[in-house]
Amino acid sequence: MEQLIERVWEYSQKNPDGFTLNLETLRPVKFGISVAYLETQDSHGIESLERVINHALQHGKIVGGWLNVENGKFYFDSVKIFKNSEQKFAEAFGISQNQIAIFDLTNLEEIKI
Amino acid sequence: MTIKKNITDKSKTLKQLQKDIEIFSDESCSYNFIEHWKPVKNLKLEKIKTDLKEYINFDNVRPEIDWDKLYEYLEVLNNSKEYNKLFLGIGMMGFSEWICEAFKENLVSNNSKNQDSIDVSIKNYKKLGFEIEQLDNDTVKITQKRIINGYILNRKELIERAKKIFPNAKILPVRYSLDVTDITPEWIQDKMKEFGLNTNDLVSQIALDKSSLSLFFSGERKMNKSVKALFFYYFLTYELNRDFREHLNQNDDSGKLEKYKFIIDKNSSHYST
């Protein structure tokens, strides 16, 4: 676990604008719609990574990191990836997770819900 | 808020007032003011009407004015961020400073919020590799600086992105331009390793002969920009191919029942499969 935390942390330092990372391959996820889980909301700083990674390992193995440009904080999330053709399900899932927006990785667009 | 109920120059009709502004614009500005008369989408006329009616019932004060046209005019100026002209225009129309003040508080406050939201959008686009720059009131430049997730936008797509933030601006799109300085023999060999390719694969697939490849790899021959770009896009194709297939296969493996369990749990008929 410590090694994984370290790898994700390093990856976040190299990608300060944000990323979506597959924990199995340690490669970025480039396609689909990313929706964050409620359980890992408001996680920032390396100390939050263990909780986020633990959750991700049990739910799809994808971790997202994003910079909130309004407060300058970098947040980590365990995220679920949907196909683009499943946008309505992604939106429904986002609503069920109290999210106000989800992110279309394929088209690089935020989708407000 | 101070409201001075002294409307000056009551004798002028709206048409005369418009003409005044047109003359003023032609004489004092290099800008054709009248262009902003053309109808724009999403006018918030009702909001302006409501706000104005809070201060005074204009219909009783100046019945000769076509108020709908006036509201539209003010909204157009506001949308185009011509604040100086907006306030001056209102003043010239004979409403004097009290109405300017009434508008100013509301419009500046709204536009300050709008500007904050524009700044956030620009910063968010920057995170995605797009730099958006306001060159002047009418022109916005959008440049794709980085490729994120393998997505290279064309001119039309760049314009569409910028239009989402600046719907009325003229957009100057600058396409992604590849910086080849990082494409070195080491970079190429790392990529070959990553995708399990050997020299023979490259010979077959990118029409370079074996001896040229050897010279490039040993550093005896320098790669020109075109050769470097060729390698970049060649490996990008492999990368996207691999990642796209991985994405499709992963989704297929996850199982629809499990994936949409949350919908069943929530008894959501609206989104039910």
Image: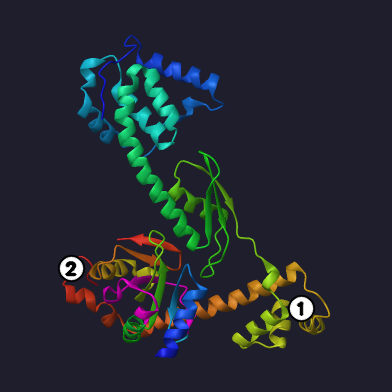
Where in the figure is residue B208, as x and y percent of width and height? 76, 78
Q: Looking at the image, is mark 2 or mark 1 earlier in the sequence?
A: 1
Residue positioned 38% across, 61% down in the render: A71
Mark sitting on residue B269: 2
Q: Chain of mark 1?
A: B
Quadrant of the rendered image containing residue B9: top left
Q: Which mark is residue B208?
A: 1
| Quadrant of residue A48 within the rendered picture | bottom left
In the image, is residue B20 above or below residue B39? above
Mark 1: give few (<14), some (14-19) or many (20+) Cα within 10 Å: some
Judge by depth and name the residue closer to the eye, A44 or B94: A44
Residue found at x 61% / y 88%: B196
Any magenta on residue A77?
no
Q: Tag 2, which chain? A: B
As displayed, is residue B144 above or below residue B257?
above
Q: Are marks 2 and 1 on the same chain?
A: yes
Q: Is B174 left or right of B254, judged from the image as shown?
A: right
Q: Which residues are magenta?
A: A26-49
Q: Quadrant for residue B53, please give it.
A: top left
Q: What is the three-letter code of the residue carrying label 1?
A: Leu
- Seen from the viewer's position, the closer of residues B171 and B255 is B171
Q: How is the image coloured?
A: rainbow
Query: Number of callouts in the render?
Result: 2
- Is A32 magenta? The answer is yes
Give the amino acid at mark 2: Ser
